[in-house]
Image (spheres, coloured by chain):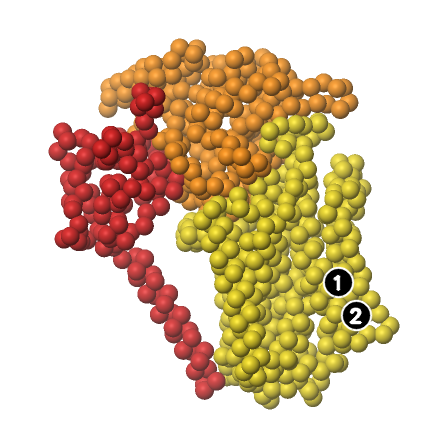
């Protein structure tokens, strides 16, 4: 049994690395302890993302475009009814005039309000920290969107064709960033982090003290959005 | 008690309706038990080499929906993925291609799932979110 | 109910047919609207990813809140022992059930996936206030159903007080649950407040009693008992007192925000420069739904006609109040970085806009029509109404 598992791990890690390509190799090497596909998620891990807003360029939307391509969402010219899994926010501090740019998506809270309020349990938090919607259970009540402090969720307002195979999406359900769980589950990381031309997004296991993200978090003072709510976010920011 | 006759009647009808509805909902769908004789049996199309699906055809015909229901919970919530047990694999193996070699989507009557579900009048919800065809490879997409 | 002659509603056939035809048409239009919304997706409505709950929710919440308040008259009779109101208690219970059914229907038909209602019944997340409410609403039907039974079946009348008390407690918990849908939203300053629960209870007492007065009067025109002026006047007085209580909670809510620096921008938006929303607050909620009914109900010269007018104004002002709470609160920007000026492609830092679409209006009104239809059916099939309301002082 052990042999089989080891073999699977090696095979999947190798496969993952090849599939992802050289761009993510550094991160992949540090993080990828690929879980065998037939084993459940492990609470030993907590996936997180560290975003350095001081390196994030105003007007650059590489992460947004990468997310659209990977997850298959796009604007249908419906204005405020269009989905947006990740967005670039330009922020100015009115007192100092300082301005920053940062991508905002689901913050993958440890205590997610969307999960608390969801009547059917469609909003759920995987034991490895990823918060996502089980579309089989979602009835489209939108209470999670009322509860989310980050406005991270979108309601699918129109019929959808040509979904990506790994990202089912459909009219009448709520959706949001799932940290590219299909990639994470095969040893990779989210598409946005891979696409960032400045390398401003680091993905990894917050529970592993030697992961790149944990090392960076020990060195720098990261903040969470709306820390007053004490949600213990998986996504954290530098330079705010 | 006289006053109550209409009320009792109303309750009785309501109970009957709810009961009948529940029975219908709980009962096996016709597709599970009978394959109407005038419907061609769906055959795997892509993998001619495979002797049968992940389980023998009679089992799949009867139980594919149970497998899908059970595995979707396991996959989405717990992360247990079993090779061949997800809809993606179903769609890859059972793809139906038209004369031009394009995979036909669920809106087409030739789609594998429609072969039984149309005549059995089973409306399925899978493809309001899931893709009903394999994703075109990059070469196909360019073409 | 001993000694009270009751009967099923026997209306002048023409008039009843007319009313039934109108109600039926409104319901058909509402169903067509719901179908249209589901078929196309919600982009055909005014709702967006910024304002996720729209006019259907305004109507649904108004009806659900009013449902709990419609039980007022029954509670006065069964729980507080005022025998004068006993002949009206069954109508009060029926109206409560009908309003709740109307409100819930609107809520369900607005879901993104109304076909999955069974999913919501079979999978419940016990930490969700919505899930508690599913339990509270179904329970309300059961509890009020039993209560109605004890009132209509004379041999069970000894259980009426117990059932009535149970229904009274249940409706208080139920409206606490409805208010908490908003009150427990930690992220949104426009909602996060413990006052939401008592405010909703006060709203329910007001709306429910007003709707009851109007329905009683309408039934009088359809062959039901004429409501004697002094009874209307007494209920009108009560309505005035409840309106005052409701205004009190509204004051507490806004004053709490105004006292702290962090709440001032929000209150400025809601009460002063937020476009249509300050108008809804001052004209709708305060003047139409508050001050005018107070004067009409508690002023020195009250008439039963004036009090019926007050009831109508309360319903109008109430709809505006719920619109102000539900929509106004959502249009205020929810900031990921409080105190910073934000811009994004997703409307960060901007005030959101909402304009209801026709299907939403029709769906909402359909809920009202459904509730009224259920009242008519109930009164026609069951011996809900007393044959007369005179001489039961």
Res. B94 in view: yes
The residue closer to the viewer here, C320 or A218, is C320
Q: Which chain is red?
A: B
Give the image quarter of residue C48.
top right
Point 59% across, 46% down: residue: C46
| Left or right placement of residue A86 versus residue B98 in this view | right
In the image, residue C345 above or below residue C283: above
x then y, percent, for residue C86: 63, 80
Point 74% across, 56% down: residue: C284
Q: Confirm or deny contact between disc 1 and disc 2 (CB under 8 A).
A: yes
Point 56% across, 66% down: residue: C369
Q: Chain of mark 1?
A: C
Q: Chain of mark 2?
A: C
In the image, residue C18 above or below residue A108: below
Q: Which chain is yellow?
A: C
Checking the image for residue C34, the label placed there is none
| Left or right placement of residue C206 versus residue A204 in this view | right
Point 44% across, 33% down: residue: A126
Name the colour assigned to chain A in the rendering. orange
Dot 1 lies on which element?
helix
């Amino acid at each position: 049994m052990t042999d089989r598992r080891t073999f699977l791990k090696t095979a999947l890690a190798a496969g993952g690395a090849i599939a992802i390509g050289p761009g993510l190799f550094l991160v992949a090497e540090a993080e990828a302890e690929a879980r065998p596909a037939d084993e459940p998620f492990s609470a030993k891990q907590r996936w997180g993302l560290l975003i350095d807003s001081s390196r994030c360029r105003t007007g650059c939307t590489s992460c947004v475009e990468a997310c659209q391509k990977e997850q298959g969402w796009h604007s249908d010219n419906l204005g405020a009814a269009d989905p947006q899994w990740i967005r670039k926010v330009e922020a100015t501090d009115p007192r100092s005039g300082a301005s920053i740019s940062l991508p905002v998506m689901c913050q993958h809270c440890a205590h997610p309000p969307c999960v608390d309020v969801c009547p059917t349990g469609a909003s759920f938090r995987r034991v490895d920290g990823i918060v996502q919607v089980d579309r089989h259970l979602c009835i489209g009540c939108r209470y999670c969107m009322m509860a989310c402090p980050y406005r991270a969720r979108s309601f699918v307002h129109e019929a959808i064709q040509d979904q990506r195979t790994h990202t089912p999406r459909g009219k009448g359900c709520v959706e949001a960033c799932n940290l590219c769980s299909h990639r994470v589950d095969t040893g990779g990381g989210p598409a946005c982090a891979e696409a960032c031309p400045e390398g401003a997004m680091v993905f990894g296991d917050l529970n592993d003290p030697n992961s790149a993200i944990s090392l960076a978090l020990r060195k720098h003072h990261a903040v969470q959005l709306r820390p007053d709510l004490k949600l213990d976010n998986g996504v954290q920011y530098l330079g705010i | 008690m006289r006053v109550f006759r209409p009320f009792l009647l109303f309750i009785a009808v309501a109970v009957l309706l709810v009961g009948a509805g529940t029975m219908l909902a709980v009962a096996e769908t016709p597709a599970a038990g009978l394959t109407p004789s005038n419907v061609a049996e769906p055959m795997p199309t892509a993998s001619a080499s495979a002797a049968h699906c992940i389980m023998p055809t009679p089992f799949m015909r009867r139980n594919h929906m149970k497998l899908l229901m059970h595995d979707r919970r396991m996959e989405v919530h717990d992360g247990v993925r079993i090779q061949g047990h997800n809809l993606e694999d179903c769609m890859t193996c059972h793809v139906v291609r038209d004369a031009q070699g394009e995979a036909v989507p669920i809106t087409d009557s030739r789609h594998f799932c429609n072969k039984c579900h149309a005549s059995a009048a089973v409306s399925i919800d899978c493809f309001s979110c899931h893709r009903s065809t394999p994703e075109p490879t990059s070469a196909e997409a360019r073409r | 109910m001993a000694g009270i002659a009751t009967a099923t509603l026997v209306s002048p056939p023409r008039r009843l047919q007319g009313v039934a035809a109108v109600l039926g048409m409104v319901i058909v239009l509402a169903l067509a609207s719901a179908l249209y919304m589901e078929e196309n997706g919600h982009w055909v409505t005014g709702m967006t990813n910024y304002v996720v709950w729209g006019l259907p929710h305004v109507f649904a919440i108004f009806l659900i809140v009013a449902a709990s308040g419609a039980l007022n008259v029954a509670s006065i009779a069964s729980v507080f022992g005022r025998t004068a109101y006993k002949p009206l208690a069954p109508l009060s219970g029926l109206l409560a059930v009908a309003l709740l059914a109307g409100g819930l229907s609107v809520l369900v038909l607005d879901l993104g996936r109304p076909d999955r209602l069974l999913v919501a019944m079979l999978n419940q997340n016990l930490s969700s206030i919505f899930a508690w409410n599913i339990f509270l609403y179904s329970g309300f039907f059961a509890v009020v159903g039993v209560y109605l039974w004890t009132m209509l079946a004379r041999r069970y009348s000894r259980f009426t007080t117990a059932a009535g008390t149970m229904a009274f407690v249940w409706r208080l918990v139920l409206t606490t649950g409805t208010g908490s849908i908003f009150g427990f939203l930690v992220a949104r300053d426009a909602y996060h407040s413990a006052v939401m629960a008592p405010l909703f209870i006060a709203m329910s007492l007001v709306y429910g009693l007003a709707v009851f007065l109007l329905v009683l009067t309408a039934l009088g025109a359809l062959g039901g008992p004429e409501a004697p002026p002094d009874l209307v006047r007494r209920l009108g007085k009560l309505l005035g007192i409840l309106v005052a209580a409701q205004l009190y909670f509204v004051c507490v809510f806004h004053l709490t925000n105004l006292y702290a620096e962090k709440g001032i921008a929000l209150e400025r938006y809601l009460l002063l420069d937020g476009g249509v929303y300050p108008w809804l607050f001052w004209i709708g909620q305060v003047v139409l739904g508050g001050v005018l009914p107070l004067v009409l109900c508690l002023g020195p010269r009250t008439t039963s006609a004036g009090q019926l007018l007050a009831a109508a104004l309360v319903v109008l002002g109430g709809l505006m109040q719920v619109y102000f709470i539900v929509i106004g609160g959502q249009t205020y920007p929810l900031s990921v970085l409080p105190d910073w000026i934000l811009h994004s492609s997703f409307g960060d830092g901007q005030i959101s806009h909402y304009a209801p679409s026709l299907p939403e209006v029709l769906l909402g009104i359909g809920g009202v029509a459904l509730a009224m239809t259920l009242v008519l059916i109930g009164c026609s099939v069951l011996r809900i109404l007393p044959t007369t309301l005179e001489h039961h002082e």
